[in-house]
Amino acid sequence: MKIGVIAPIWLEIPPKGYGGTEYVVYNLVNGLVDKGHDVTFFGARNAKVKAKVFPTVEMPLREQSVEWTNVSYTLFHLAQSFEKAGEFDVIHMHVNKSQDYLSLPLSLLSKTPVVFTLHFKVPTPTYNKDRYLVLNKYRDLPFTSISNSQRKPTQLNYIKTVYNSLDIKSYPFSETHSDYFVWLGKINPLKGTKEAILAAKRAGVKLYVMGVVDRGVPHLLQYYEKEISPLIDGKNIIWIGEVETDRKAKYLAGAKAFLNPILWEEPFGLVMAESQATGTPVISFNRGAAPEVIVDGKTGFLVDTLDQMVEKMKYVDQLNRRDCRDNVESKFSIEKMVEGYEDAYSTAMKNWKTYINTYLSSSK
């Protein structure tokens, strides 16, 4: 197939540190090329992918200190991409920010099928209502979900669930661990940074905090400065900061468990798969896609409260670390993800005219 992949333009691909969506897109593009597909990547000129790169921006927008709310760069990026749509069998649009919704009306002008993957919690009539109105208007277009949990809030035309993947070779397996726990992610109250620290303090264990502070978002910076930084003592709660994949994998592999007290319906949570790939189990709040990523009682524990998390920390050594690795290899490999999207592309190519006609009929 000739495939055009419209990528996010905010962070490097592959990302140097934080950037789950960018990491997934990187793995997908390279995996499709390795499978023999003719792939064109639409995004930043400096992207390091195996596909042909059609640059729509010179460099990722965050490197240019562009505000997250900027719309003009995204519009230019999407316009450039869709003008080339006729050169492909299918276009894969990765929707990562609200500005990317501009791709929905643009796709109606395309004779080439477009598959949309949403990399965020799907809006509802009571959560981001303005975005829900837009997404619901174009609900008949073909969407893929990154978990079954992601589908629940809004009735869209989901044609496939395709789990995110990781390059398992980048996460060496470890049969043994050191005497510490770990938390990893963007410093954000919804991701439970503070709760993980509080759990570690209650349990009297050492916790490494590997996180990135988005200093361009005032409320996230304030959360770090007022809620997280005062809890870092350098002895039991140790700040590591943002790390590249190699160091991240080493910290994960050495941990007794990854603490994941998420406070939202996270649509996937790649770090849970990254942790298990190294053999390290995950103790997570039972929300979002956690039940799809963790095998409760085998590759980690699903809990509902902080007290339950503290209690389960006593039992992580009873879990088989090889089971954690096997779970990732069977469900979250690049090969598995590529196969899933190949199926989605084929479905969209067969039914594109139907999707468009359904939209036109429902919008009258």
Image (cartoon, rainbow, N blue to C red):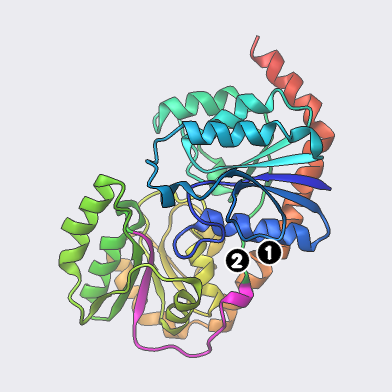
Q: Residue furthest front?
A: 58
Whether residue 204 is in magenta: the answer is: no
Give coordinates of residue 119: x percent, y percent: 53, 46
The image quarter containing residue 362 is: top right
Amino acid type assigned to the residue bearing label 2 in the image: Leu
Residue pointed to by mark 2: 166
Label 2: element kind: loop
Residue 239 in the figure: left or right of residue 328: left
Label 2: how many Cα within 10 Å (few below 14, some 14–19, many 20+): many
Give coordinates of residue 227: x percent, y percent: 19, 58
Residue at image position (58%, 56%) is: 46
Residue 234 in the figure: left or right of residue 60: left
Residue 223 in the figure: left or right of residue 101: left
Between the residue at mark 2 and the residue at mark 1, the CA separation in whole angstroms equals 6 Å
Would you say the residues marked 2 and 1 are in contact, meaning their CB atoms lie under 8 Å apart? Answer: yes
Amino acid type assigned to the residue bearing label 1 in the image: Ile
Frontmost residue, 64 versus 349: 64
N-terminal label among 2 and 1: 2
Residue pointed to by mark 1: 334
Q: Quadrant of the C terminus?
A: top right
Give coordinates of residue 279: x percent, y percent: 53, 80
Residue 173 in the figure: left or right of residue 311: right
Residue at image position (35%, 65%) is: 211
What's the mark number on residue 265? none
Frontmost residue, 282 versus 343: 343
Evaluate whether residue 265 shows in this view.
Answer: yes
Label 1: element kind: helix
Give coordinates of residue 223: x percent, y percent: 23, 53
Quick check: 35 above or below 245? above
